[in-house]
Amino acid sequence: MRRLSQLDGPFKALVTMFTIVLSCGFGVAHLYLHHTVDRADGKEDLVPTARDIALHYHGEPGTTRFRTKVLGSMKKYFSAEEDPGKLTPEEEADHAAVLDWDARGAPEAEYWDPATKDYAKIGNILLNRGCFDCHAPDAVGKGSKPKSPLDTYAGVKKFATENTGMSTGELLMLSHIHLLGMGLMFLGLGFAVALTSFSARLRAGVICAGFASVLLDIGGWWAVKYGGANWTWLVLAGGLLMGAAFALGALMALHECWLRKPPPDA
């Protein structure tokens, strides 16, 4: 079988551009992962942590997403200076009142009048602290969350319920999409790796590692969902293995195309 180094220029260009586009897609996928999973605990870290993964898939029984956000990334908005460490006594009182309301089951009458929809104590706190500037269906500013409205009781209650993480239906859909998508990704890259001149053992190892990382990563999601935070290492290990297998496979393919000289009798 001919190697990549023996192919004509157009075929090398095909493999190269496919690898580049695939690499861009892989990078964007990890940016999306950072955007969605990394902020699960209300804090923005360099990379998703074990706690982020546990909160995203398993949740945190006994508390709510609303409470996690109010204690984390949203706390600064209770401050006029947008500094969570510089809340005035009045701002501290509002922050504590919202947390207490959540802890007592978020009763509707304290958010607004169920009949007139006029805001009561909690609704007015969220309004006055600017929460509706971003968390409303018509919010259009930078960082707005129109799909996470807090300007109605139904919108708030969606987040002020026990945090059980991703639903089984969502996880099934996510697993289905990723198994097919990442399977095809490693199929294409695997063909390119198989046509390089590196040792058969190395080629087989990189190809198998790519597919194994997909199973490890997605299997880890389910393990965390139903087994708890103790299984986050599976997701972390799957992600690291996936990144290593993809990077090594892409470098092998590009090296074979442009840096390895074809044999004299090619």
Image (spheres, helix red, strand yellow):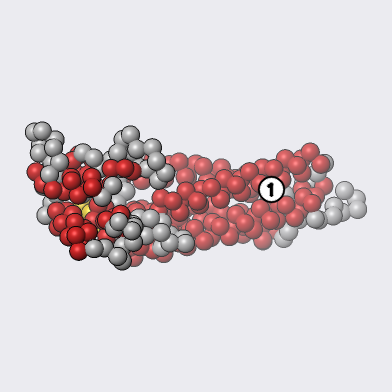
Compare residues 73 and 7 and report the one nearer the observer. 73
Q: Residue at x 56, y 57 (%)?
A: 243
Give SS at disc 1. helix
User: 146 above or below 212?
Assistant: above
Left or right: 258, with 165 as reference point = right
Q: Residue at x 75, y 55 (%)?
A: 255
Residue at the limit of the structure toward the right, as seen here: 264
Can residue 169 be seen by looking at this rendering?
no
User: 140 above or below 261?
Assistant: above
Q: Residue at x 57, y 45 (%)?
A: 25
Compare residues 70 and 174 and report the one nearer the observer. 70
Q: Residue at x 10, y 37 (%)?
A: 114
Q: Quadrant of residue 68?
A: bottom left
Compare residues 30 and 115 and report the one nearer the observer. 115
User: 259 above or below 183?
Assistant: below
x, y percentage for residue 144? 37, 43
x, y percentage for residue 109? 9, 43
**Pointer 1 residue:** 192
Left or right: 240, with 76 as reference point = right
Left or right: 183, with 236 as reference point = right
Compare residues 38 and 249 and report the one nearer the observer. 38
Going by the numbered disc 1, the residue's amino acid type is Ala
x, y percentage for residue 53? 38, 58
Q: Quadrant of residue 153?
A: top left
User: 84 above or below 221?
Assistant: below
x, y percentage for residue 260? 81, 56
